[in-house]
Amino acid sequence: MEKVLEVRNVTKYYGGGSVVAKALDGISLSVEKGEFTAVMGPSGSGKSTLLNVIATIDRVSAGEILLRGKRLTEMKEKELSVFRRDQLGFVFQEYNLLDTLTVGENIVLPLNLRRADYQESRKKLEQVSEALEVADQLDKFPGELSGGQRQRAACARAIITDPALVLADEPTGALDSRNSKKLMETFRSMNRAFGSTILMVTHDPVVGSYADRVLFLKDGKVWNELYRGDRSRQAVYREIMAVSAALGGEGAFMEGEEPLAAETAAPMPEGTSVCYGGPGMEGAPAAGEGRGLMGKDASMEGEVSKC
Ligand code: ADP
């Protein structure tokens, strides 16, 4: 498998003098081609900072970041802006579509900025807009679309250049739960139909449960990580809730949101595994050690697996 992203021992400090905040604390992780990864964790755990340094919006204090083997941390600003345009796709919480352009013009904008061939651009526009179900909205203006439709258009724009990595920062933050789920189906389509590699920050366990892999941050480090494997989304949701409880109380990163009834109906199944392993796992409990996950203080033998 090709490693698209490598974050190696990255530390990020904010401030100076006696008021210094360590937002990232020697964090290491990697993302492979075609992975759909969610980044979760309590408020202040470093999620946005991580996304910002990968997006090259912010500089690291120490460590290095490689995208497709290229060291972003060594690039100069001019080189970075070209790199960002060509290699990264972005989906933000607030759509970020230009109101004066039609939806189609918005989606195709990254190709126009590259001066891509017109016919090729039209073909690509047709392909992504159909796959993401915005094909019949192309001649409208963003203001005429619902929040969910606008966000799907933003997704189409993010993948039209086939970027190495799509970065999404709380993409469902402005959507209700029905549209959030639909948007996550869109992310899955991007991932499956176009092979997009996605790194998404979310505080919402329902949204996180659509990913193939969930990284949990705490105090600027990867504290835990779980893989979907062949489990159902509901099972992944329950695992997220369990880890969230261990990280800082039941529903620690729900921020007051009520989970949907369907998500909470079934209890955590017997024998569900929570996987610890991979890079940057310094703070995570060892297999069998137990840390009160799922409210149990007893040994977790047989439930926590190193994977
Ligand atoms: P999260 O996205 O998980 O809520 P952040 O990455 O926003 O966490 O923040 C991680 C830590 O870094 C927090 O302690 C926060 O206060 C601090 N921090 C983030 N941005 C800044 C900044 N611009 N100036 C000072 N401290 C910051």
Image (cartoon, grey):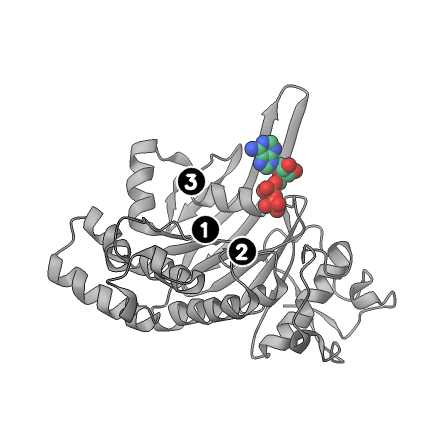
The answer to whether marks 1 and 3 mark residues whose Cβ atoms lie closer than 8 Å is no
Instruction: Please give left or right for residue 77 compared with residue 111 in the image.
Output: right
The answer to whether marks 2 and 1 mark residues whose Cβ atoms lie closer than 8 Å is yes
Q: Which label's residue is closer to the chain start, 2 or 1?
A: 1
Which residue carries the number 3 mark?
56
> CA gap, disc 2 to disc 1?
8 Å
Quick one: quadrant of the C terminus?
Answer: bottom right
> CA gap, disc 2 to disc 3?
22 Å
Say if 45 sits above or below 126 in the image: above
The x and y percentages for residue 204 are 61, 60
Which residue carries the number 1 mark?
94
Tag 3, which secondary structure?
loop
Q: Picture quarter containing residue 251?
A: bottom right
Tag 1, which secondary structure?
loop
Residue at 64% in and 32% down: 21
Ligand 1 shows up in the quarter that is top right
Instruction: Please give left or right for residue 106 compared with residue 235 in the image.
Output: left
> Residue 21: which disc?
none
Q: Name, please, the residue furthest toward the right.
A: 298
Pointer 2 residue Cβ closer than 8 Å to ligand 1: no
- Mark 2 or 3: in front is 2
Which residue carries the number 2 mark?
173
Residue at 12% in and 58% down: 118
Instruction: Please give left or right for residue 61 compared with residue 263 in the image.
Output: left
The x and y percentages for residue 174 are 51, 56
Q: Is residue 13 visible?
A: no
Q: Which label's residue is closer to the chain start, 1 or 3?
A: 3
Residues 164 and 261: in front is 261
> CA gap, disc 1 to disc 3?
20 Å
Tag 2, which secondary structure?
loop
